[in-house]
């Protein structure tokens, strides 16, 4: 990988972040944030913003803070922060069917996304424990989503994981999964129950204890000095036989079979037991029949029946079904480096950097060829700067 390519992708990351930056005011509230992609995603998304803030810290620390402050600006007195915030314009009529809102005039959705705000704040802004609004946000999550009191969170529909139409949700939600025609029925059902996890459980669920959400939750807990959720994650979701983390659905205790990159996401946890991390890497991430492709890691294992490396086709766009996303590459790369797989981490980074250098910051990439897919000028793909120019300072040592 030439240093010219590294510099080029870092410059491109800055260009895209600056281009997608949007400031204004809605319902009397000021905001300033990075939209995920011009045109296609005209609002603020919770986890996209966390990733954008992490990269903004390299170019403009004020913007990193403003990005995360805009999430906190819509926080309700309960501590809740929704997964999409409609700053620019209200939800269109056609999108109403698919969006987790109570009405068209809503400023935000009623659902969550992977809760990495406190961790992102630690990396990009400062000590999240010194920010009472973050504490309130974490308290809301614990009070409303830790349904079994073991420290792990439960989600009420697939898009709360950020992994929308991943095939791993189909054994649970079936034709009501994201990207399937029945999804609006799930939204309607949950809307009637105010997207309240306990009420949804009382009505028969399903609910899911999902690996990626709980990985981000554990990182945030640790970033604020609260007890880690990693021991509970291992206790509940680690599958010793498969050497993987696997979600659990309730009622019924179903453990979905499809193998996706989310099973490897706990690699980002600094307190993950080392033996587990090594199994994730050696048996799966470095396995050419699973996640070792030229541009890795594919969002679904190459061996899986649901693997669609070009993202699939159809009426509804289907995300996370095989292509490589740059946030996932960054998350597993953190663990590879921590556990000493330096050369392998570099190879993975090189694959992603080369794809971004050639194709620009796309939403996702074909894991075989690196062809860019989905939205263009996609903000969180700016995380390629973390791979191209690792930060040796305090922020990175926290990783
Ligand atoms: C898609 C992704 C989700 C993301 C959103 C905005 O819905 O699946 O993770 O937050 O787009 O980029």
Image (tube, rainbow, N blue to C red):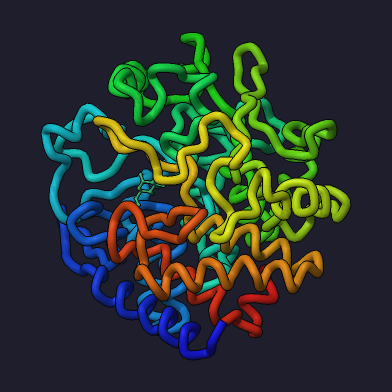
Q: How many marks?
A: 0
Quadrant for the N terminus in the image? bottom right
Q: Quadrant of residue 126?
A: bottom right
Give the farthest residue toward the front.
Answer: 369
Q: Quadrant of residue 39?
A: bottom left
Q: Is residue 125 visible?
A: no
Q: Vertical placement of 126 versus 106: above or below?
A: below
Please state which of residues 100 and 97 is positioned toward the viewer in this rendering.
97
Q: Vertical placement of 89 versus 248: above or below?
A: below
Quadrant for the C terminus in the image? bottom right
Give the farthest residue toward the bottom.
Answer: 4
Q: Position of residue 244 (x, y in %)?
A: 74, 39
Q: Residue at x 72, y 54 (%)?
A: 286
Whether residue 34 sits left or right of residue 228 in the image: it is left
Q: Residue at x 52, y 49 (%)?
A: 115
Q: Position of residue 378 (x, y in %)?
A: 33, 62
Q: Residue at x 79, y 56 (%)?
A: 271
Q: Vertical placement of 94 versus 15: above or below?
A: above
């Amino acid at each position: 990988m030439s240093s010219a390519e590294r510099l080029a992708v870092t410059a491109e990351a800055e260009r895209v972040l600056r281009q997608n930056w949007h400031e204004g005011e809605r319902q009397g509230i000021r905001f300033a944030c990075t939209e995920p992609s011009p045109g296609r995603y005209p609002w603020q998304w919770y986890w996209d913003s966390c990733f954008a803030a992490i990269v903004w810290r390299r170019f403009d620390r004020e913007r990193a803070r403003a990005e995360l402050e805009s999430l906190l600006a819509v926080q309700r007195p309960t501590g809740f922060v929704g997964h999409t915030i409609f700053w620019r314009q209200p939800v269109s009529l056609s999108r109403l069917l698919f969006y987790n809102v109570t009405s068209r005039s809503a400023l935000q959705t009623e659902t969550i996304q992977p809760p990495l705000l406190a961790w992102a704040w630690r990396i990009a802004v400062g000590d999240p424990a010194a920010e009472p609004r973050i504490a309130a946000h974490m308290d809301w999550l614990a009070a409303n989503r830790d349904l079994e009191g073991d420290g792990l969170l439960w989600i009420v529909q697939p898009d709360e994981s950020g992994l929308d139409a991943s095939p791993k949700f189909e054994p649970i939600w079936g034709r009501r999964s994201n990207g399937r025609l029945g999804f609006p029925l799930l939204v309607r059902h949950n809307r009637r129950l105010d997207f309240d996890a306990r009420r949804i459980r009382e009505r028969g669920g399903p609910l899911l204890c999902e690996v990626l959400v709980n990985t981000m939750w554990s990182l945030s807990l640790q970033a604020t000095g609260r007890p880690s959720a990693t021991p509970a994650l291992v206790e509940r979701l680690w599958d010793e036989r498969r050497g993987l983390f696997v979600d659990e659905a309730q009622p019924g205790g179903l453990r979905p079979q499809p193998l996706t990159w989310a099973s490897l996401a706990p690699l980002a946890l600094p307190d993950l037991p080392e033996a587990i991390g090594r199994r994730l890497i050696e048996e799966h991430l470095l396995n050419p029949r699973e996640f070792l492709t030229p541009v890795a890691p594919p969002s679904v294992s190459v061996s899986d029946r649901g693997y669609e490396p070009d993202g699939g086709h159809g009426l509804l766009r289907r995300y996370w079904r095989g292509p490589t996303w740059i946030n996932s590459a960054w998350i597993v790369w953190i663990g590879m480096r921590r556990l000493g797989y330096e050369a392998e981490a570099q190879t993975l980074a090189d694959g992603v950097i080369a794809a971004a250098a050639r194709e620009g910051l796309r939403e996702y990439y074909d894991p075989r060829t690196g062809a860019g897919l989905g939205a263009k000028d996609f903000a969180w793909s700016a995380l390629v700067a973390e791979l191209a120019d690792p930060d040796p300072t305090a922020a990175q040592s926290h990783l």
